[in-house]
Amino acid sequence: MVLELSLYSLPGARPLEIRLNGRPVQTLPIPAGISPRRYVTAPLGLPAGPSLIELSAPEGGVSPQALGAGEDTRPLSFSIHHARLREVME
C-alpha cells in the first residue's frame, strides 16, 4: 500500500512527517505554494489488522493571526485536499 496525498504547505515550505503505528516511515519535503500538489509515499508495508497513519509538521504551524491574515489563532501547517491508500501491484 502507498499513501497518495494532495496538499500544500501553509504558508511556507516545511517537511511532512508520516508515521505508521508510531514509527516514522517517511518525510516528504513540501514546498511553499497555494495550489495542491500530488505526493505518493514509498510502500508502507501495512501489517494485518488495524493501523494508525499520522501526518505531522515537526516544525509546527503558523496562525493566520501571526501572518496578519485575520483573527484565527490556530497554528496551521498544511491544507490537505485528498488522501487515500492505494494497493500497489508488484
Image (cartoon, rainbow, N blue to C red):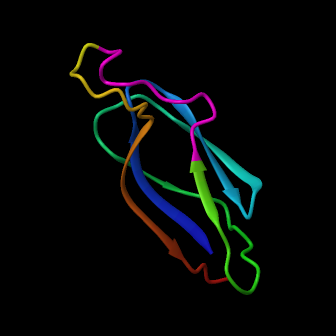
Dividing the picture into quadrants, the one containing residue 83 is bottom left
Q: Is residue 31 left or right of residue 74?
A: right
Q: Quadrant of the N terminus?
A: bottom right
Q: Position of residue 53 (x, y in %)?
A: 62, 63
Residue at 43%, 24% (x, y): give it. 62
Q: Position of residue 87 (x, y in %)?
A: 57, 80
Rendered view: 53 above or below 38: below
Dividing the picture into quadrants, the one containing residue 20 is bottom right
The magenta stretch spans residue 61: yes
Q: Position of residue 45 (x, y in %)?
A: 74, 73
Tally the numbered discs: 0
Rendered view: 5 above or below 87: above
Rendered view: 46 above or below 77: below
Dividing the picture into quadrants, the one containing residue 76 is top left
Q: Position of residue 49 (x, y in %)?
A: 71, 86
Residue at 63%, 34% (x, y): give it. 58
Relative depth, front residue between 72 and 28: 72
Q: Is residue 63 left or right of residue 17?
A: left
Q: Is residue 89 left or right of residue 22?
A: left
- Range of magenta residues: 56-67
Q: Is residue 75 left or right of residue 73?
A: right
Magenta: predominant secondary structure element? loop
Residue at 48%, 27% (x, y): give it. 13
Relative depth, front residue between 37 and 90: 37
Q: Quadrant of the C terminus?
A: bottom right
Residue at 43%, 30% (x, y): give it. 75
The magenta stretch spans residue 77: no
